[in-house]
Image (cartoon, coloured by chain):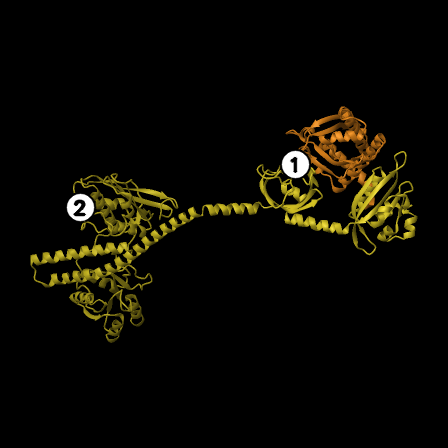
Chain colours: A yellow, B orange
């Protein structure tokens, strides 16, 4: 039967051959087919039911092969299908079935013949190639010189945004490449054999129009007078973009370095300035401390001197002059400490309008008749949280500056208004409600340079002896300490506006009690035995003298250690007054030691610093240096009264 | 977007491909008798695409203008069938069909007639086989020859909503390989009907192996 078909010749390399008798509806197969299907060779040759054809075909492939054969039986001519066959030992082989239908004179199909070719290896290779292409994003192509079409893979089409196809016209592929590029596939009959395939192309994808970069690699195979190109393409857009970014970075490197250096220089300048300020602050604090001690010695000595020498108006005047000098010196140290932020502020709710009205007279008198003050306050202004003494000083200071800016006289405006500030709106200010107190003059103003340095400590434009250069820096320090800020706005010949921003508070202002009588209640208390401690001999002597003058018995100690020894030896000691800043043992440390052995003994801490620890024992009374005899007496009273706590109202 | 109701499954696609294969086989047989030489026709694959996409597909694959034979059909499913060749191939096809005893001018003169006749044989066979296999009947109009771009042949407009059954056809006449396309433009209800009929056909053929 097989000799009737030319297929037997081709079947030499095949895995089986069949003849399907459509008229008889029977299937005849050769020995290889029978072996593949596990059929008896003799029966198989003789004839089996035609449905046997589908028996060994993988169930998943069976429906489509049935459909294909139905086509043949109904009149289709060619059969060419790939499907899996399950062999008797259970292994799965990929077969390519190729067949043809034979017709009778009336065009009715009578026979369907064909053969199987084992394509398992090819299928696996194809599968590997397909995975390699999709996983690696690599598309393959093959082009034979002279043809108008290119054999391509699906991935090739995907990379260019074309519909999947096996063959594409050269022109379609090249139309995707940017105009100024060489063609991706050489144009047909271009004449020249390309020397190499390695190249990168810019393309516009056919589907979405996006710009991509595609690399081409491959080999050129010479065939006779022509050639064949076998190659791959892949997307290199990411690499190209990175390259572009790198190039851009490189090109702008110099500029960016300059920018960076400028930023760094500015930061360094700012830092240097900050260091300078810090150093000045430290220095000022230290000097002020020593000043305080000296002024205290002078002041208390003068006070005692005044008491002891015979009353003579001239002498008293001289002594009072000296006292005034010492007082002004003390005020200066207060300013310096405020600048160094070491002086305690006593912030409390303050009614600014009332405060300004209260001091306006004084200011006007200080300034002189050519500089009237004009006030501008709204009816209702929330109180601010501030230290009223410092605020008065600041106002005075700003007014003096305003006067000095208008040598020929002029009105000075002092105004205040409530302002709401958003976060980040004004440097240094947190979001919230503020009261802005401003002092405005129409004077000579400041140039930018001066304005920039105006709040630097010791910077002054005034003649030698006219200003300390501490005024504005002190106000700035005050504002910052109160969580506000100080802003100067000025231009040459356009006057100056000094703005002091202070946080508004909803607490009611405290009405200050009338100042207590300055006359000390000397001798009012019992006579006590007091231990005075100070590392500065001058101060110690002064303190002791003042105490003795008040009628107390005094022991003197130059250090905390000595103090403890004396205390041990003299249980009759009623009270201790000690300096805070001492080497080895600080005043507070001494107080703690005393509290261990003699908790009933009150301790007065004399300090020029504002940095008394927050956890200082409650029964400690604080005494600000410099102090005079009256202050000392008051501190003694406070210390002895068990309900009087902590700090003096100063 | 192509609605799910007209998306063909793999088996439905296979079935339609085979049915069209039967049709083109019959056409090949007719052509063989007509020109008394070898003619092989086969349809390797089929796709359902939108009209717009069909126009793009063909313009990606064919860079020259196209020539087409068009016939409309009505029945349980109605639409328009097109047999499309690249214009450059049409004269070769005509020369192959009419044989080698004519001058170029004579071939050009016969082109229109020969194409219409060839197209009519192929499209008629395909549609008649479809009707026959799906156990329905179709009425067809006379063939018309058209030239133009993919977009004009598929009548792509902003509102084109029809779908296209797009078939590749391998045409071998007197050892000359010519590639062409069969396209059937159907509206969605017609395609849904066709899909139902294909399912019936599959049920009949595959039976218990489904």
| Circle 2 SS class | helix
Q: Quadrant of the N terminus of chain A?
A: top right
Asked which quadrant contains residue A548, the reply is bottom left
Q: Residues within 10 Å of mark 2 (few under 14, many from 20)?
A: few
Q: CA distance from mark 1 to mark 2?
A: 97 Å
* Chain that bears disc 2: A
Residue A52 lies, in percent from the top left, at: 86, 48
The x, y position of residue B160, in whole percent, is: 67, 30
In this orientation, does residue A163 appear? yes
Subunit bearing disc 1: A
Which residue is found at the position 31% from the left and 63% from the top?
A618
Name the side, left or right, on which A455 lies relative to A227: left
Nearest the camera: A346 or A77?
Answer: A77
Q: Quadrant of residue B125?
A: top right
Whichever of labels 1 and 2 marks the residue nearer the N terminus, that label is 1
In the image as oriented, which residue stretches furthest toward the bottom?
A569
The quadrant of the picture occupied by the C terminus of chain A is bottom left
- A491 or A592: which is nearer to us? A491
In the foreground, A94 or A378: A94
- Verify CB contact (< 8 Å) between mark 1 and mark 2: no
Q: Is residue A607 above or below residue B146?
A: below
Which quadrant of the view contains residue B178?
top right
- Judge by depth and name the residue closer to the eye, A328 or A128: A128
Please tell me whether mark 1 sits on a helix, a strand or a loop: helix
Residue A541 spot, x, y in % from top left: 18, 67
Question: At which x and y percent is residue B141?
Answer: 78, 25
Q: In the rendered view, does A116 fall on the left or right side of A460?
A: right
| Residue B136 versus residue A303 in the image, above or below | above
Tell me the number on the disc at residue A171.
1
Question: Would you call the spot at circle 1 few (<14 residues within 10 Å), some (14-19), or many (20 or more)?
Answer: many
State the residue position of label 2. A366
């Amino acid at each position: 039967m097989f000799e009737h078909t030319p297929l037997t010749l081709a079947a030499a390399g095949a895995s089986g051959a069949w003849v399907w008798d459509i008229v008889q509806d029977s299937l005849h197969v050769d020995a290889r087919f029978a072996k593949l299907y596990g059929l008896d060779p003799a029966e198989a040759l003789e004839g089996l039911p035609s449905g046997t054809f589908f028996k060994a075909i993988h169930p998943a492939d069976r429906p489509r092969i049935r459909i294909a054969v139905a086509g043949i039986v109904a009149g289709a001519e060619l059969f060419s299908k790939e499907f899996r066959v399950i062999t008797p030992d259970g292994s799965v082989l990929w077969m390519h079935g190729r067949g043809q239908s034979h017709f009778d004179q009336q065009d009715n199909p009578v026979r369907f013949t064909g053969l199987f070719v084992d394509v398992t290896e090819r299928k696996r290779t194809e599968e590997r190639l397909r995975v390699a292409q999709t996983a690696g994003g690599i598309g393959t192509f093959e082009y034979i010189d002279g043809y108008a079409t290119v054999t391509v893979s699906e991935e090739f089409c995907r990379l260019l945004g074309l519909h999947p196809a096996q063959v594409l016209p050269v022109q379609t592929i090249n139309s995707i490449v940017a105009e100024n590029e060489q063609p991706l596939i050489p144009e047909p009959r271009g004449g020249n054999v390309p020397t190499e395939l390695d190249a990168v192309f810019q393309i516009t994808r056919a589907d979405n129009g996006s710009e991509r970069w595609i690399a081409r690699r491959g080999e050129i195979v010479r065939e006779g007078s022509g050639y064949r190109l076998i190659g791959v393409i892949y997307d290199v857009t990411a690499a190209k973009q990175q390259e572009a970014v790198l190039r851009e970075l490189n090109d702008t490197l110099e500029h960016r370095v300059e920018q960076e250096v400028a930023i760094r220089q500015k930061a360094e300048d700012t830092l240097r300035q900050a260091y300078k300020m810090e150093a000045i602050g430290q220095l000022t604090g230290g000097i002020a401390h020593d000043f305080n001690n000296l002024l205290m010695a002078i002041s208390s000595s003068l006070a005692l001197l005044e008491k002891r020498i015979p009353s003579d108006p001239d002498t008293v005047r001289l002594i009072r002059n000296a006292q005034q000098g010492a007082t002004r010196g003390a005020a200066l140290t207060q300013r310096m400490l405020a600048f160094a932020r070491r002086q305690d502020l006593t912030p409390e709710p303050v009614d600014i309008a009332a405060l300004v009205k209260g001091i306006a007279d004084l200011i006007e008198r200080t300034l002189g008749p050519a500089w009237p003050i004009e006030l501008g306050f709204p009816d209702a202004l929330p109180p601010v949280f501030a230290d009223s003494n410092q605020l008065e000083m600041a106002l005075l200071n700003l007014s003096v500056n305003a006067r000095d800016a208008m040598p020929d006289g002029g009105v000075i405006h002092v105004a205040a208004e409530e302002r709401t500030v958003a976060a980040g709106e004004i440097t240094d200010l947190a979001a919230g409600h503020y009261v802005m107190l401003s002092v405005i003059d129409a004077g000579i103003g400041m140039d930018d340079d001066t304005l920039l340095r105006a709040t630097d400590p010791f910077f002054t434009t005034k003649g030698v002896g006219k200003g300390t250069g501490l005024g504005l820096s002190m106000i700035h320090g005050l504002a910052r300490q109160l969580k506000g800020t100080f802003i100067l706005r000025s231009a040459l010949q356009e006057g100056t506006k000094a703005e002091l921003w202070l946080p508004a508070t909803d607490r009611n202002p405290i009405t200050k009690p009338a100042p207590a009588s300055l006359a000390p209640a000397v001798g009012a208390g019992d006579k006590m035995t007091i231990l005075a401690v100070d590392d500065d001999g001058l101060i110690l002597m002064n303190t002791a003298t003042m105490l003795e003058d008040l009628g107390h018995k005094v022991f003197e100690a130059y250090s905390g250690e000595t103090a403890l020894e004396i205390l041990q030896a003299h249980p009759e000691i009623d009270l201790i007054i000690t300096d805070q800043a001492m080497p080895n043992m600080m005043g507070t440390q001494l107080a703690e030691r005393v509290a261990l052995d003699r908790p009933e003994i009150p301790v007065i801490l004399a300090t020029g610093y504002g940095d008394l620890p927050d956890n200082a024992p409650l029964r400690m009374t604080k005494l600000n240096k410099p102090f005079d005899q009256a202050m000392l007496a008051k501190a003694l009273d406070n210390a002895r009264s068990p309900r009087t706590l902590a700090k003096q109202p100063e | 977007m192509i609605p799910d109701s007209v998306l063909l499954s793999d088996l439905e696609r296979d079935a339609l491909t085979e049915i069209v294969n039967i049709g083109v086989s019959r056409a090949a047989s007719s052509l063989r008798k007509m020109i008394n030489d070898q003619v092989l026709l086969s349809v390797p694959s089929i796709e359902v695409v939108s009209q717009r996409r069909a126009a793009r597909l063909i313009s990606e694959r064919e860079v020259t203008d196209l020539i087409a034979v068009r016939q409309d059909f009505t029945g349980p499913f109605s639409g328009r069938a097109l047999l499309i060749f690249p214009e450059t191939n049409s004269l070769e096809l005509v020369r192959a069909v009419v044989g080698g005893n004519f001058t170029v001018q004579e071939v050009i003169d016969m082109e229109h007639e020969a194409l219409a006749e060839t197209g009519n044989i192929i499209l008629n066979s395909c549609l008649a086989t479809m009707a026959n296999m799906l156990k329905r009947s179709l009425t067809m109009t006379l063939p018309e020859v058209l030239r133009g771009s993919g977009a004009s042949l598929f009548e792509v407009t902003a509102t084109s909503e029809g779908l296209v059954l797009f078939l590749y056809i391998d045409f071998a006449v007197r050892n000359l390989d010519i590639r062409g396309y069969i396209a059937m433009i159907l509206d969605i209800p017609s395609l849904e009907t066709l899909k139902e009929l294909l399912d019936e056909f599959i049920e009949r053929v595959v039976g218990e192996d489904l």
